[in-house]
Each structure stands twice: as C-alpha cells, then as structure tokens.
Amino acid sequence: MDIYQCAEQYGVAQLADQCKREIQNCLQCPFDYIEMFRYSKQIHLEYMYNTTLSIIATEFETVVKDKNFMLLTAQELTHFLQKADSIFIDELTLFKTLEKWASGQCKLKDKSTSGEVQKQGLGQLLFQVRNPLISLQTFSDEIVGTGILTSNEQLTLFKYYSGVEKSTTSVCGFCLKPRRKKVGDGQWKNKKNVVT
C-alpha cells in the first residue's frame, strides 16, 4: 500500500498499476477487511473501497467478530450498513451487534450504557435492523429488555405482531423487506428465488 501511495504521489504509472493489480489479488484472500476498507478510503482507491464494502456485506457475520469492529466510527458503520439489502446476517444478530457496538462506544466516551444512551449513540443505525422480521417471542425475550427501543416503538411493534398495526413497507421506521439469506455454498436466497 505504501509503495502504491508513493507511485501515485510521484507519478510512476507502471508501478502504480502493478500495485493496483497486487491489491486486487489480495482482495481475494482472507484479511482484515476493516483495515482494508479504511485504507482504501484514505488513499481514494475506489475499486478496492467498493470491493471491500461488497465483501464486508457478504461476510458481515465474520466481520462483526473482528477486534477492530468495535472501534469503527458511526460514519464507518453507516457505510457498511448502507448496503442493507446485501448484508448477510440475521436481524437478531445485527441488533445484538449494534447493541454491543453502542455499549462499547458509551464506555469509550465514559457515558452510561443504558438503553436510552445507546439509542442516542446508534441514531439512525438502529433503523438498519429489521425488527418486525424478528419473531414475537425473540423480540420479547431479546430486544424489549435492552431498553434501546422507546415504549412507543415497542408498543407499535407489538401491535404489528398482533395484526392491529398494518403496513407493507415499515413499522416505526423499521423496514419489512427481508434480506437475502445464504442457503448453501455459493447460493443466496432472495425472497423466493435461489440465486447461484
């Protein structure tokens, strides 16, 4: 990467092209995607940036376990979650991940880790979780007790689960559209279709 930056800075096009090819080859191997994302953004290497974002979306469950995940800024996490339909993760895992991230951010800033403070830290990130797609039992057992959702949001979601609240697109700002799911090696299911 440093060689690439030098080649770009001093106008050595052939070396810069060779570095780009090497970087593209590296994208095919397992590595610290978060660091690659940050670095590609820093040096303005658009192909690597977009490719890394795509890999992060498809490997999101692995990426959230990375030690650097908790150090992401809200802006960086927003970049990852902007590919919301492409992220391969179940909604409860995403909620728990965001809860853990928000708690970590609160601790870094010496703030309370209450649900209300976590919600403030999450801001619009919270609405990337498609809470209405979580089962009523799981919602009641795993999400309500965190205190992250307001009483009004909880009530509206309970009304949705009971059939009182009807919607086809969202409930309290939480999307109803299912994400794609991995169904096998190299196959992804989007709604009713299987894509290979």
Image (cartoon, grey):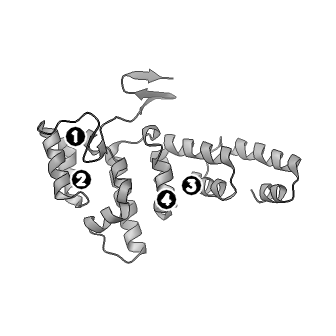
Instruction: Return the residue at label 4.
Output: 75
For mark 2, give the secondary structure: helix
Q: Are marks 1 and 2 in contact (CB under 8 Å)?
A: no
Mark 4: give few (<14), some (14-19) or many (20+) Cα within 10 Å: few
Q: Are marks 1 and 4 in contact (CB under 8 Å)?
A: no
Foreground mark, 3 or 4, reads 4
Q: Give the number of the disc on residue 135.
A: 1
Residue 82 percent across, percent down from the top left? 47, 46
CA distance separating discs 1 and 2:
11 Å
For mark 1, give the secondary structure: loop
Q: Give the number of the disc on residue 143.
A: 2
Q: Earlier in the sequence, mark 3 or mark 4?
A: 3
Residue 73 percent across, percent down from the top left? 49, 63
- Left or right: 50, with 100 as reference point: right
Q: Which residue is more in the foreground, 128 or 61?
A: 128
Mark 1: give few (<14), some (14-19) or many (20+) Cα within 10 Å: few
Q: Give the number of the disc on residue 34.
A: 3
For the image shown, how many numbered marks are present on the structure?
4
Q: Earlier in the sequence, mark 1 or mark 2?
A: 1
* Residue drawn where x is 46% and y is 29% of the image: 188
Residue 49 percent across, percent down from the top left? 62, 48
Mark 2: give few (<14), some (14-19) or many (20+) Cα within 10 Å: some
For mark 3, give the secondary structure: helix
